[in-house]
Image (cartoon, helix red, strand yellow):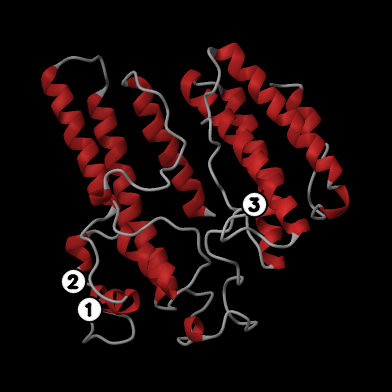
Amino acid sequence: MGVIIEEMQHLRGVNRLLVELGAAPVLSRQDFPYETDLYPFPFELAPLSSVSLAKYTYCEADPVRLARVRSVESNSVYLVDKIKGTLGGEIAANHVGKLYDAVITTLAELKEAADLELDYNAWFQEIGDVKAEGEFGHFQFFHSLYEASHPLIEGTPDIWTLPASNARYPSHDVPINPTAYDGRPTSIEDTELRALAWLGYMNYWSMLLMLDSAYRSSSATDVALAQSIMLGPLNSIARYLPTRGSAVPFDPLSMDFNPGLNEAANKRFAHMMLQETRDFARSLENLLPADFNIDLYDQLLNSV
């Protein structure tokens, strides 16, 4: 949860920077990267495993430091070589820090051009702090899970070689890249689980509509609304579906998260999305997780 919260703070930071630069927030994900040199791995939603942990560990690492780190299991093995073995060969030489280095370099060019009023030193500090959080805290966390040295799984070096059906395995056996859309190769087959996944979509989209508005206008109310959805109904569904062998797909909203002509139109759209989400949740009331608070929507609708 700590990593998740920090990543959301990073998302907030880079979007605040975009807004201060006069650009729009970005909350949609690319289904296929336009700049493939920025990505070490193809994007996918997958259960936690030695493979996914190897990717996270590699992506967060400082490349210079990574080249010197020895594996926990043997001092004669470098961690980067073990990761390559897990992933089946060579890896593109890209890390999260490289992306933030590019941001800092671009900010330095803007400062030199003197085209924009911006507290550059504060932003250099903030982007540097974001990079450091990944290269140290996040790297250490994922590394400890990957090599089974984390206190929760320490003493079980074989943990990631167990079948996913084993009770000791640390993650649920869920499909890779599931979708709640019909007729896709990875569509969720069970109709009840697909309906709950669709409700997950609607909460996810509602949350991002609120976040987009919050980033554009620095609205504390919209931030609170987004957090209420994130920590309430979306969290409930996201935790419940894996216990049933499924997962929230997190597909993007095709019209993006700022679909209106102006702020009033966007508010109206968000209000209608929340209404539809509430009504759909009511139609699934017998399927909802025990901790799902369906009354929250009426409180949210009074605030949008």
Q: Secondary structure at mark 3?
A: loop
The quadrant holding residue 260 is top right
* Amino acid residing under circle 3: Ala
Q: Which residue is mark 3?
A: 180
Vertical relation: 74 (above or below) 83: below
Closer to us: 72 or 249: 249
Q: Nearer the viewer, residue 299 or 28?
A: 28
Mark-to-mark CA distance, 2 and 1 = 7 Å
Q: Which is more foreground, mark 3 or mark 2?
A: 3
Q: Which mark is residue 68?
A: 2
- CB-based contact (under 8 Å), mark 3 and mark 1: no
Q: Looking at the image, which is closer to me, 127 or 255?
A: 255
x, y percent for residue 201:
64, 44
- State the residue at coordinates (72%, 66%): 244
Give the distance between the C-alpha atoms of the residues marked 3 and 1, in whole angstroms: 41 Å
Q: Quadrant of the N terminus?
A: bottom right
**Residue at 53% over, 59% down:** 177
Dot placed on the residue nearer the N-terminal end, 2 or 1: 2
Q: Residue beneath label 1, please?
A: 78
| Up/down of 185 relative to 284, above or below | below
Q: CA distance from mark 3 to mark 2?
A: 43 Å
Residue type for callout 2: Arg
Three-letter amino acid code at the position of disc 1: Tyr
Q: Report whether 180 appears left or right of 286.
A: left
